[in-house]
Image (cartoon, rainbow, N blue to C red):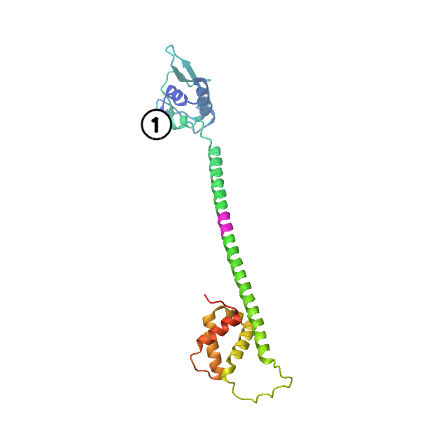
Amino acid sequence: MSGRCSPTEALALLGPDFSPMAAADEMMQAIRTNSSFRLWCDGVLIKPHIAVSAKVVPTLEADGRWTADIESTGPGLARGLPWELEIDDVMALRPQPDTRAEAMQAAATAATAAAEAARAEAATARAESEQARAVLQAATEHVEKAQARAEAAEARADAMVSDMTISSDPEPEPRRRPGPKYKDDWPMLVAAETIRLARHQPEMLENLEALVRYMHTFLKEEIGWMENNEKEIREKLRFLLNIKRK
C-alpha cells in the first residue's frame, strides 16, 4: 500500500489496533520524533524542525464519526489545511506480528522433527544390532558343532588306528621293509589323514563331497589307487565322521 491519506483517514487505518485518542497520540509522537515519518501540507513536505510542534487533534463529530486535524503548539501550523501523511508510514505504526513467537514455534517444530528422526535412527540401529547378534550367535553355534564333529572324528580315528595297530601276538611283528604301500591299507591312510585334517584343517571336514574328492586324490598319490573308489571312500568317511545317511 502506498500513497498519502488525510489525518482522518489515518485514524481509520489505525482503528483496528488503537482507539481514536491513542491513534492520534501515536501519529503525533511519530511526527515529532521520527524524521522519516513525513507530514505534508498542500503537497509540500514539512521540514522536521517545524514538524516537531505539530499536534494531532482527534474530534468526535455529532454523527458519531471521528475526525482528525493538525495544529501547532507554536506558530506556523493551523487546522483546516490540506494535511497529508504517507500511508506506509501510518501502517508502520500498527503493532507488528510477534516474530519471536513464530521463530520459537518453528524451532520447536524443527527440534521435534529432529528428535523423531533420531528415534527412528536409533530403532533402526537396534534392529541391525539384534540381527547382527543373531547372525553371530548362529555362526558361533555352527563353529562349535563343527569343532565337536571334528573332535569326535579324531577320537574315532584314533581308536580305529589303535585297533589296527595293536596285535594279540605278544611277539612284535617284523617291521615291514620300506617300499610302496599296499592298496589294502587305504582305510588306515584315510583315517590317519582325517585325523591330520581334524587337527590342522577342521574346515575340510564340513563338506563331505569335497572331502571325498580330496581323499581320492590323496590315495592316488599315496598308493596309486586309480579305481573308481569314491563310494568306498564316502562310506568310510561317513563312519569316521559319524554322518548319518539322509
**Image quadrant in which the C terminus is located:** bottom left
Q: Position of residue 15 (x, y in %)?
A: 41, 21
**Image quadrant in which the N terminus is located:** top left
Image height check: is 218 above or below 128? below
In this orientation, which residue lies closer to the viewer: 156 or 21? 156
Q: Residue at x 54, y 76 (%)?
A: 191
Residue farthest to the top, as pictured? 62
Q: Position of residue 59 (x, y in %)?
A: 41, 14
Q: Position of residue 161 (x, y in %)?
A: 57, 77
Task: Tell me where the magenta segment starts and ends, as one range.
Answer: 121-127
In this orientation, which residue lies closer to the viewer: 51 or 22? 22
Q: Residue at x 58, y 71 (%)?
A: 155
**Magenta stretch mostly in which secondary structure?**
helix
Dividing the picture into quarters, in which one does residue 84 lie?
top left
Q: Position of residue 72 (x, y in %)?
A: 44, 18
Image height check: is 136 above or below 219? above
Instruction: Give the total number of marks visible in the rendering.
Output: 1
In this orientation, which residue lies closer to the viewer: 150 or 14? 150
Residue tagged 1: 3
In this orientation, which residue lies closer to the viewer: 57 or 153? 153
Q: Is residue 133 left or right of residue 64?
A: right
Amino acid type shown at disc 1: Gly
Q: Is residue 160 left or right of residue 40?
A: right
